[in-house]
Amino acid sequence: MEENNSITKISQGLNVIKKNIQDIINLSNILKTSLGPLGMDKVIRETRKNILITNDGATILDRAKIKGEIRKMIVELSMAQDNEIGDGTTGVVVLTGGLLEQAQKLLETGIHPVRICEGYEHASDICISYLEKISQIFDQKLEIFQNLVKAAMTAMNSKIINRSKKKLAEICVKAILAIADLRRRDVNLELIKIEGKIGGNLEKTTLINGIIIDKEFSNPQMPKEIRDVRLSILTCPLEPAKPKAKHKIEIENIETYEDLEKVEQNYFREMIDQIKTSGTNLVLCQWGFDDEGNHLLLRNKLSAVRWVSGAEIELLSVSTGAQIVPRFNEITTSTIGFAGRVRESNLGMNQERFLIIEDCPLSNSVTIFIRGNSDLIIEEAKRAIRDSLCVVKNLLKDSRIISGGGSSEMACSVFIKEIAETNLGIKHYILGGFSEALKIIPIVLAENAGYSSIEILSNLFTRQISEKNIHLGIDSNGNGIDDMNKQNIYETLISKQQQIQTATQMANTILRIDDIISLERDQN
């Protein structure tokens, strides 16, 4: 039976564009108050027992159930910023809202949406070129560490954990430098594992030169520390094979039972002998093993860890050089991996135990071990650390930086305003609208810091022109307007360029939608 779709509702024209613009402006208004170092937090109640408190734009967009197809499309586009750069999601949505707000005014004057899109693309190209012109290159040879720390601290300014931002920023930079291939300027963030445990405070967060596994040795009598580790990674259980089909064994006398026990014992002995012959002294198993196997491992002075997750097994394989073995008879000297030391540690009064695998020869895998007094703090710290890691990674790829605090947006706004004054007609109005939209970032930063946004914006605009200082921006520490270079507030050039490009593309996407066609199944 064929199913037919019939058009039941058509909305088109300028009204659709204005409705879509208003939807995005409303979404932008939600995130506005989360922008900047003094941005407010949002509470997302996922269930009655599970709430999330954060001011991270990417997390809010990802976890909040945004309704409306147009809003969902903007969420997907803004998450691309987070996936590509790792930071700046809030700024992208806020800037998109500013661009669409100005576009709405241009539409009311009778300018066609296509002309607005063309003008916005042109203005975006001007911004990208101007940002490259005003960017700075820090001295990588003399001050690489301190400059990377400053940039990482800027990424943490808006987070809950900003009181410990210097300590966490230094950890992030050390972690990146430990795994980075500086010759190729390549950074694999998968080699950095982030773990957290409740207890202590953020100042006790440490960087471990190795991998942490949230497991303990399978037997409490096994040694708590092993040096010169030769490990095997197994994805098969340490127990006799079980038939996949249903089966039933009838034991009629004691001799049959003893024979069955001997078969099982021989099976275990073969497995243990295979492990010992390969030279292994630590077994990491993705599955479990029964008490008999655990006992035999202890008797043969072999340490073991069971129920290791698949992600941890893959990371250990890359770091130690051990091959992932699916069957015991494939364990040989060529499949084992190596590590300098494996030790078991514990935390707090609850004696939560975990393993630390250090000095892995094939890769410089590191673990950032976060301490905090609640799950909320630990999860927010993980998000902040991820943002900072991405910022440092981007700086290693491209060492150009620009001043933060809304100074670069205001400088671009002034520059485009000057270009707009030299043009006539529609181009003049569109470039002027783009210039006004860029001011939304310093305006929101000023509002969230408790300043009078109109007064601060007017003074900032005037001082940047009169003092010819493009580094003047919004100082949220109470000074109003200050030089962002003196405040050590930096952002990466590629992050800011990506923000402007993404926001322009999002705004143009909305402006090009003038029809909403609803389809419903024909019930006849």
Image (tube, rainbow, N blue to C red):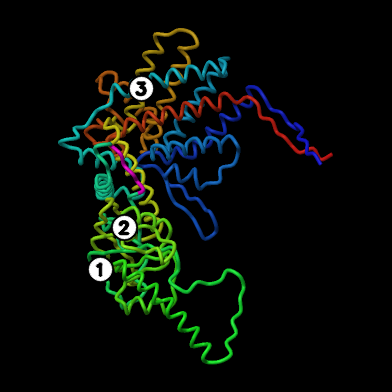
Q: Quadrant of the N terminus?
A: top right
Q: Would you say residue 453 is visible in this rendering?
A: yes
At label 3, counting other C-alpha atoms closer than 10 Å, the crowd grade (few under 14, some 14-19, many 20 or more) is many
Q: Earlier in the sequence, mark 1 or mark 2?
A: 2
Per the rendering, the mark at residue 211 is 2
At label 1, counting other C-alpha atoms closer than 10 Å, the crowd grade (few under 14, some 14-19, many 20 or more) is some
Residue 458 within the magenta-colored segment of the rendering:
no
Query: In the image, which is nearer the foreground, mark 3 or mark 2?
Result: 2
Q: Residue furthest right?
A: 524
Q: Nearer the viewer, residue 191 or 8?
A: 191
At label 2, counting other C-alpha atoms closer than 10 Å, the crowd grade (few under 14, some 14-19, many 20 or more) is many
Asked if disc 3 and disc 2 are in contact, CB closer than 8 Å, the reply is no
Q: Quadrant of the C terminus?
A: top right
Vertical placement of 496 versus 208: above or below? above
Give the residue type at disc 2. Ile
Q: CA distance from mark 3 to mark 1?
A: 59 Å
Residue at the (47%, 53%) spot, across then down: 52
Residue at the (75%, 31%) spot, across then down: 7
Vertical placement of 471 versus 235: above or below? above
- Left or right: residue 138 versus residue 493 is left
Residue 379 drawn at (x, y percent): 40, 54
Q: Residue furthest bottom?
A: 254
Per the rendering, the mark at residue 226 is 1
Q: Would you say residue 463 is visible in this rendering?
A: no
Magenta-drawn segment: 185-190
Query: In the image, which is nearer the foreground, mark 3 or mark 1?
Result: 1
Q: Secondary structure at mark 3?
A: helix
Question: In the rendered image, which residue does mark 3 sit on?
Answer: 412
Give the residue type at disc 1. Ile
